[in-house]
Amino acid sequence: MKQKRKVKKIPIVFILTLLIFVFIVIPFTILKITEDGQYYVEDLNTSEVQASYKHYIFASFKMDTIDSKYACIKDENGKILRLQSGIVNLKTKDITENTEYTADTDETGYVNGSYGADAQYLGTSFNGKKVHFKISGVQAWTDINNVELYLYDDSYTLSTYYVYKGSLIHTISTDLVQGNANSIAIGPAPKFLKEDTAYYSYDGHYFYTSYKNLVDDKKVNKNPYYNYYQYVPHRTTSYLNNVIYNTYVNDESALYNQADVFFNIQAKYAINASMMYALALNESGLGLSQYALEYHNLFGHAAIDENPDNANQYKSIADCVKQHAYNFLQQGYLNPEDSRYHGSWFGDKASGINVNYASDPYWGEKAASFYYQLDEDGIDQKKNPIKTIQLSKDLKVYAPNKKDVLYTYKKGSIVSINILEDEHRYYKISSEAPVKDNHLNVNAKYKNSYAYIKKSDFK
């Protein structure tokens, strides 16, 4: 008869030790080695600390349980890392230093807080390391150490829009705390905006009568506004009388009596003369900058923020304008196959030349402002009909044979089109770059270049 083997019992002490190790020691050790700082959940209204943690994520969980607009998270140095809602201050660096960001579209970009100090706060990353913000149309993430977060109150000077004598004025904050700001007339005011009212907007398309309404997304307008002079493509024609160009400069300016140069370049390269002149006015301080007078550099070519004295030198004003039209625009910013291309309009930080040309978030508005002043009778606006929309689907731009695809705008992009003709199911449009043998060719002449888009795609 076979004897049954006795099963050895595991000592209770061993089991308890194992449980303590698994459920207490290991978690405690993990928490200890993952400590990432000292964080305080605070009420900004009373300065009362609600709780403190050594993990940002636990402080964030705690903050979410507090029903107060004054709740925030601070680090051990008192820096605010997260708010319920508030303002992002971008002016935290020297004017020679830019703040780099990664847009929601995964494209990298940069902005300089000395030209536009305030942005809308959209949130903080799960680990407290990145801040999500909106300025000049772009939504993006930047390192928390690049910015400062403020709870909104009336003591800060924020950028606002208002209507004055039919024009839309943008007052741009250049210092939230000191109250410094600059005002520019960027274009004709949309009819839905009223005089004697301050409007808040960080994209220039949708407007709000208070900062709280902006945070709550209570818009004044249902449909977006696109400022004509900010979104007109460079591949349009200016019909302005060149005598008007001297209205904005004196005989000490490098731009004085230079109108013919711009119109000759327009005739040769099919690039809007008044847009180039407006950009020159903006970049050269009305033609009075050192680089304009000594280097014949009207457009700030190579005068980067870190080293403006790196600016290109040209043999003449005509040489500079030619290089700008052909090398910088046709070969680069107006070339859909170039990494700098985001649309040929002045634009903002979401689309257009402003995306990569300048660190000033409102560079596009400022250039547009000069064009708006030049076109005081609206001649160019009447003769260059454009249509600007944010795409709900991809938009393919076809060659003249209506088969080959020249380039494609992605869904969600803001696109501005100069419509030449309405042809049943298609729009005949100005191509952004020269077209030869049904392909883009930036080395070819632009004359007689055109393209097509399907009407059904342009929505």
Image: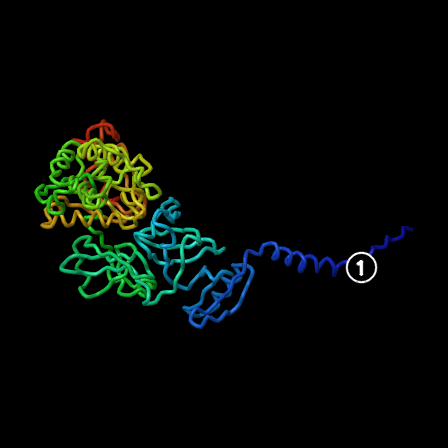
x then y, percent, for residue 48: 48, 71
Q: Residues within 10 Å of mark 1 (few under 14, many from 20)?
A: few
Q: State the residue at coordinates (32%, 52%).
A: 114
| Left or right, residue 160 beside residue 73 | left
Residue 420 located left or right of residue 104: left
Label 1 sits on a secondary structure element that is loop
Q: In the displayed image of the protein, which residue is found farthest to the right?
A: 1
Q: How is the image coloured?
A: rainbow
| Residue 178 vertical placement versus 237 (above, below) | below
Q: How many labels does the image show?
A: 1
Q: Which residue is drawn at 32% across and 67% down?
A: 154
Q: Can residue 208 be seen in this view?
A: yes
**Relative image position of residue 137 (x, y in whole percent):** 30, 52
Q: In which quarter of the image is residue 206?
A: bottom left
Q: At label 1, which amino acid type do we have?
A: Pro
Position of residue 368 measured from the top left corner of the image (x, y, whole percent): 20, 48
Q: Residue at x 42, y 68 (%)?
A: 70
State whether residue 423 appears in this view. no
Observer-nearest residue: 396 or 297? 297
In the rendered image, the vertical position of residue 314 relative to residue 457, given as above or below: above
Q: Position of residue 75 (x, y in %)?
A: 50, 60
Q: Mark 1 points at which residue?
A: 11
State the residue in front, 357 or 69: 357
Q: Quadrant of residue 454?
A: top left
